[in-house]
Image (tube, rainbow, N blue to C red):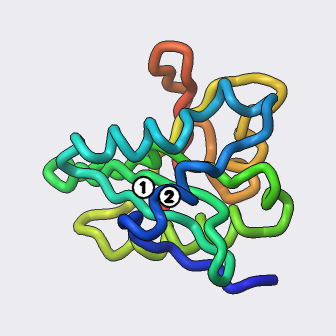
Amino acid sequence: MAHVSLREVVESNVRPVMDLAVRADQRRYVADNARTIAEHAYADEAWLRSIYADEVPVGLLLLSERRSLPRYYLWRFMIDARHQGCGYGRAAMGLLVEYVRTLPNAFELFVSYLPGDASPYGFYTKIGFVDTGREHGVEREMLLRL
């Protein structure tokens, strides 16, 4: 498997990262990368990273870092359709968890998902997330204890 790393989104890689997309049946579950990058630009406590396999961008993640609470929430996570099933998502989640553990009072990492056939629920449960039983509108919340 290729070496997976998390890198800043900068001028030299923003276009290739924006061009990444999930499968058609997954599009209702995650916003496109252009929207994620734009929302990050206006978020005070957020950490945006592109996911690379060797020198190829394969995904994107956005973490809400509300250190004042503290509450850490995986706001967005995606792996491009052409690169799914290669272990890049699992490796990137491992790197994200390592990062979150370095943050003040980081004992939990939250994520939410929309239920459905192509939902990321199965992926998150394989990583170790469990349902909290809480709902935010139509999304269900999951938790990973660190």
Q: Which one is nearer the viewer's eye here, 73 or 57?
A: 57
Q: Position of residue 45 (x, y in %)?
A: 22, 51
Q: Is residue 74 above or below residue 58?
A: above
Q: What residue is at 62 percent from the left and 44 percent from the top?
A: 130
Q: CB of mark 1 within 8 Å of CB of mark 2?
A: yes
Q: What residue is at 38 percent from the left and 61 percent from the top?
A: 107
Q: Is label 2 in a helix, a strand or a loop? A: strand
Which amino acid type is shown beneath numbered disc 1? Glu
Choose the circle earlier in sequence order: 1 or 2: 1
Task: Give the residue at mark 2.
Answer: 145
Q: Is residue 47 left or right of residue 81?
A: left
Q: Which one is nearer the viewer's eye here, 14 or 36?
A: 14
Quadrant assignment for the N terminus: bottom right
Q: What residue is at 39 percent from the left and 58 percent from the top?
A: 48
Which amino acid type is shown beneath numbered disc 2? Arg
Q: Position of residue 77 (x, y in %)?
A: 56, 49
Task: Give the residue at mark 1.
Answer: 108
